[in-house]
Image: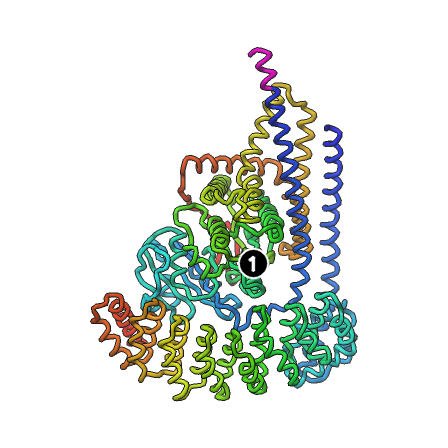
Amino acid sequence: VQRLLIAISVFEAFIIAMTTFALFAIQLWRHTKRRRVAFSERAAYEALCSLAVNGVGDQTTITRLRALPRYAQLQVIIATSDSFGGGHLGRLRDVANRLGLTEKSEAWARSTAWRNRLRAARLISAIGAAEARFDGLLADSNFLVRAQAAEWRADWSSSSILLVTSMLDDACRLCRIAAQDAVLRIGPAAIEPLAQFLNNNRGKSLGAALRVAAKLSDCRFLPVALCYAADSDDGNRAAAAHVLAAIGGDAASEAVITLLEDASALVRIAALAALKKLACWPAAKQVALCLHDPAWAVRKEAALVLLSFGSPGVLMLRCFAQEYDSDVASIALETLATGVAAGANT
Amino acid sequence: MSPAVVHAIREAVSGCNWAIGVYFVLTNTFYAMLLTSAALYLRGANQAKAFSSRLCGSNFAPTVSILLPAYNEAVVISDSVHALIDLHYPNLEVVVVDDGSTDTTFEILSRTFDLQRIPSLFENRIQTSEIIGVFRSRSYPNLLVARKKNGGKADALNAALNIASGELVCAVDADTLVDADALKTMVRPFLMSEDVVAAGGTVLVANACVVKRGRVAEGHVSKKLLAGIQTVEYLRAYIFGRVGWNWLGGNLIISGAFGLFSRAALLDIGGYSRDTVGEDAELIFKLRRWSYDHGKQWTVHFVPDPVAWTEVPERLKVLRSQRDRWQRGLADAMWRHRRLFGNPRYGALGLFVIPSFLFTELLAPVIEASGLLLLTVGLWLHAVDTRFALLFFLVAYGYGVVLSLATVLLETMTYERYSGAGDGARLWLWALFENLGYRQLTVWWRLHGMFRFLRGRKDWKTVPRGGFDLTPKALTKGAGQHG
């Protein structure tokens, strides 16, 4: 046993010596490398910023970037891509082409290793290069790659718009968020494909797509929002209420008022929030009836919506403050006491 | 004493020493497994860092409510709240609960943030002490302040849970320094899997760091013995102690200083337990148990990225009371959820995670102290050879140093948050010292904590801290000193 312990001690001493050596070697290597790369990196950033601002690159832009290791080239180009407006992104693409990065990223995009494809997606989406590979990355099997590709900054082709709208139904939430951001960035060009996507996928849970439709707030979503307001899925009906609130108009208001009698508390809350956004004070009576709702969150929302309606709402709250139901009366009183006072102060 | 009795004692001591030797081998093999698991996990996590964090800051990202319980925090409250409001996250709400402070905490909040009373309309899903009023800031509409009667930290957190409206909630301590991009990092696991209900992040020691505007600008390792050793200890606890668990059945501990949770899940389990000294440890036990009991697939994730910084005690007395409380908290959580132990109904949690925690965390000080005691008795009775004892001690010390140095190396290769001149050398030095005296001291304190738990003590001594210098003068100088 003692021999074994001696052997273990010697082995531990060896490991400690190796770890110590590795620790100090890494620090020394990083220190010298960092100083060298940091200097070249600064020069490369300056050259690229001059290209973004003046439109003409320094004679030595490429030379300065070539002085950097590949990972630093990628880092500098991706970091400065935000400074290039849509129209000027071509200049950055040209630099990446001349450095051979576009070619390399195409090779990465074909790789079987997802980490390489992710690296390709980062560069391709940041500068809008290698368009031929883009749709493939949007439909990638790895969710990180799909989400990264959706950050594409150049003009979107119609096939890519269709792909990104279909990602609004992705199983991974990260991809759904990436798609929502992308659709919002695409703007008007995405309205028709999104409405079509919503029409073609009835029966699925499409809260993410409806929420982005609400942000786009276009009247072309009215028919589809009215359909989803009668959907069997609670989440869809609640999201449809937000779309209707964003679109506005009599038809939307009527549909939202109908949702106040929905079986789901989630939908009733969404309907109340929608009425607040629509400033639909003629619905004050229906909203006031929600003060009797069995769900506490609905009662609270109703009180706050009434307060936001101004005089008609306050009138309703005063009536309900004298109710025999102590819960309802206390909500109404609390809202009146602090809410009206705060309104008067402001 | 008759020779027969002495012989019997010798035999018993020798047997116990062998049993402890077996425990030593098993525990250290388990630690090596954790370290390997952490190294493999960090390799993947480091490569996935290439993924842009922009998405996690999207307007469609889930709303996060930061819960900040405050009791007599007049000195730091304004800076803490400012630092939290300025976090880089789009959908953010900050809920401060003034837990019946007897100083000017509320007055400072009211004056600094221009508070206005709003209707106290929230569902009391978790019972708490009476809430006196809810206020919203006119200058920062996403800041809510609740004023309530004193009920303790867990009670204040429960009140904040009732008031918060975010999908996710993040519990922080008033003296925790949170990195600006911390929430973007922490929200990542929630976006990648719908089953994640809690995520913890690495909390590092900030005692010697340069603090600017409530954030750590430069990470440095303290030159002071206790703070320096705790720097290595924290690295080891987080980097391999918790990252390693991500692949071995999930984590059981998320630091109370910084953790992100699903609000719905916390409300389902009834929030924080008020009658315990380790409400953060107990919360994760409760979450995971509830998940099994109700057929859910909830998971608890640990994000290895350093996200928050905390000040550690530099005085032995204070450190002792902290460790004593941690041990009582863990013991209490284990005792409350003792049904999980070895219970196949709870899958990997009952059969592997809980037993491992019991033997390597909770009972470790008892076994280590017994080992030291028996070794001394054995030497006295000549049941143990002196040379063997010395060699055994050398092996144990060497193994501890190997683990600490491997963790320091992992940190240097991945995040390198302590990157100042001489920090690497200091970490190396403290890693050598950690197992000489300090570890034995913590064993004694933890043992004391166990004893106090068995006696039913649930008091929570306030840990006095030096505090970061966040005064305007220090801020303009750009350097926060500790002390």
Residue B24 appears in the rendering: yes
- Which image quarter: residue B395? top right
Residue drawn 45% across the image and 56% down it: B174
Q: Chain of mark 1?
A: B
Q: Vertical placement of A60 versus B418: above or below?
A: below
Q: Amino acid at mark 1?
A: Val
Residue B293 left/right relative to B147: right
**Mark 1 packing: few (<14 Cα in 10 Å), some, or many (20+)?**
many
Q: Which residue is mark 1?
A: B307
Residue A330 left/right relative to B337: left
Quadrant of the rendering where the N terminus of chain B is positioned: top right
Which secondary structure type mostly characterizes the magenta part of the structure? helix
* Residue A19: x %, y % from top left: 72, 46
- Which image quarter: residue B19? top right
* Residue B155: x %, y % from top left: 38, 53
Residue drawn 52% across the image and 35% down it: B444
Residue numbers of the magenta segment: B1-9
Q: Vertical placement of B294 versus B53: above or below?
A: above
Colouring scheme, one of rainbow, by chain, secondary structure, one colour: rainbow
* Residue A326: x %, y % from top left: 23, 66
Element on which disc 1 rests? strand
